[in-house]
Image (tube, rainbow, N blue to C red):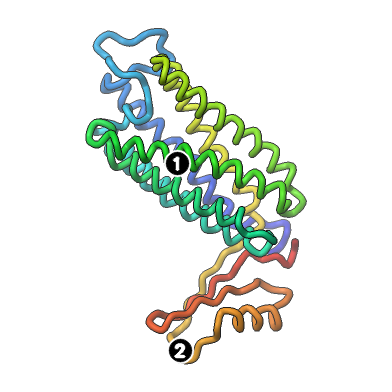
């Protein structure tokens, strides 16, 4: 890939950040307009409005709950795609894969948590909703720290410090928000707890947007071929790829006796 060009994959984390943020704020404004919650900038509660502007409460009742469920489902799907692509991107560059695998698993669990809190509203099933919230915030925070460490360790295109330091700052911000959120919740200071929660979510979404920096250097391709009776083993495929395409994309060859062969082109390291 020409170093002066940016891969179209850089837009994936940006789309995730922008559309999820916009969707959540739409949920907030719908709930405020319907007097389900009072605004974040209120000095005190509006007359007749009983609930603090928590995200879960904003998306608890229709029509806001319909938008909230859709937003969280889309966010979970995009986060899962980002998790897989990030894992593939770093796989050939890390000597000890446990940290990369941990990042993948943590983000997958956070994505699963998003679907739970989005589809099980607070008043319908509080227990499952809270499990989803814990998975999203808990494993989401862990993901931030793991990816920050991987960024500094791998140092893609010598941009490790330039990207890693902001990620460390965002990770610290997310962690601080999580701690403050639970402290304020325990003390019953709900308006400030809700504000911290919104700040936490915006920091988390901003963190995802930073993956565009590294994704702009990479191209991902899936090539499907017709079914063949003779298959190469995984190790043989890798060996042939390294022998005949040393200056091109490393190939991962997946085969099955019942489905067509799938060739997944891993990130191009020729210009690294």
What's the residue at 45%, 45% (across, down)?
110
Q: Counting other residues with Cα less than 10 Å from the Cα at mark 1, is it few (<14), some (14-19), or many (20 or more)?
A: some
Is residue 246 visible in the rendered image? The answer is: yes
The answer to which of 131 and 1 lies nearer the viewer is: 131
Q: In which quarter of the image is residue 248?
A: bottom right
Q: Residue 66 carries which label?
A: none
The residue tagged with tag 1: helix, strand or loop? helix
Circles 1, 2 touching at the beta carbon (< 8 Å): no
Residue 133 image point, x, y percent = 39, 36
Q: Which residue lies furthest to the bottom in this view?
A: 229
The image shows residue 14 at horizontal and vertical percentages of 54, 45
Q: Please tell me whether mark 1 or mark 2 is closer to you in this view.
A: 2
* Whether residue 180 is situated above or below residue 76 in the rendered picture: above
The kind of secondary structure element at disc 2 is loop
Q: In which quarter of the image is the C terminus?
A: bottom right
The local crowd at label 2, few if under 14, some if 14 to 19, many if 20 or more residues have their Cα within 10 Å, is: few
User: Is residue 208 something one can see in this rendering?
Assistant: no
Please name the residue shown 73% across and 74% down the image. 247
Question: Which quarter shows the N terminus?
Answer: bottom right
N-terminal label among 1 and 2: 1
Q: How many labels does the image show?
A: 2
Q: Name the residue under label 2.
A: 228
Instruction: Locate residue 268 relative to residue 200 in the image: left or right.
Output: right
Which quadrant of the figure has residue 215?
Answer: bottom right
Q: In this view, does 90 lie to the left or right of 14?
A: right
User: Where 113 sits versus 267, above or below?
Assistant: above
Question: For this rendering, which residue is in front, 228 or 25?
Answer: 228
**Can you give x and y, in whole percent of width and height, for residue 19 in the image?**
45, 41
Q: Which mark is residue 19?
A: 1
User: Which residue is at 36% across, 47% downward?
Assistant: 73
CA gap between label 1 and label 2 equals 42 Å
């Amino acid at each position: 890939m020409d170093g002066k060009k940016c891969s179209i994959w850089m837009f994936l984390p940006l789309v995730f950040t922008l559309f999820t943020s916009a969707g959540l704020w739409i949920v907030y404004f719908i709930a405020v307009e319907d007097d389900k919650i009072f605004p974040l900038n209120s000095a005190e509660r509006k007359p007749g409005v009983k609930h603090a502007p928590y995200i879960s409460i904003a998306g608890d009742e229709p029509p806001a709950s319909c938008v909230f469920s859709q937003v969280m489902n889309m966010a979970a799907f995009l986060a899962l795609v980002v998790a897989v692509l990030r894992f593939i991107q770093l796989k050939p560059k890390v000597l000890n894969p446990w940290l990369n695998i941990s990042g993948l698993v943590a983000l997958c669990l956070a994505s699963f948590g998003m679907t739970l809190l989005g589809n099980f509203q607070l008043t319908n099933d509080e227990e499952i909703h809270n499990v989803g919230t814990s998975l999203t915030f808990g494993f989401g925070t862990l993901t931030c720290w793991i990816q920050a460490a991987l960024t500094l360790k791998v140092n893609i295109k010598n941009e490790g410090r330039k990207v890693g330091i902001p990620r460390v700052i965002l990770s610290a911000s997310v962690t601080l928000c999580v701690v403050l959120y639970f402290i304020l919740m325990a003390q019953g200071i709900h308006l400030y707890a809700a504000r911290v929660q919104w700040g936490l979510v915006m920091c988390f979404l901003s963190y995802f947007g930073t993956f565009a920096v590294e994704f702009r250097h990479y191209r991902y391709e899936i090539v499907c071929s017709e079914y063949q009776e003779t298959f190469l083993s995984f190790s043989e495929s890798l060996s042939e790829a390294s022998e005949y395409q040393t200056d091109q994309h490393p190939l991962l060859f997946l085969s099955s006796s019942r489905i067509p062969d799938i060739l997944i082109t891993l990130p191009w390291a020729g210009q690294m």
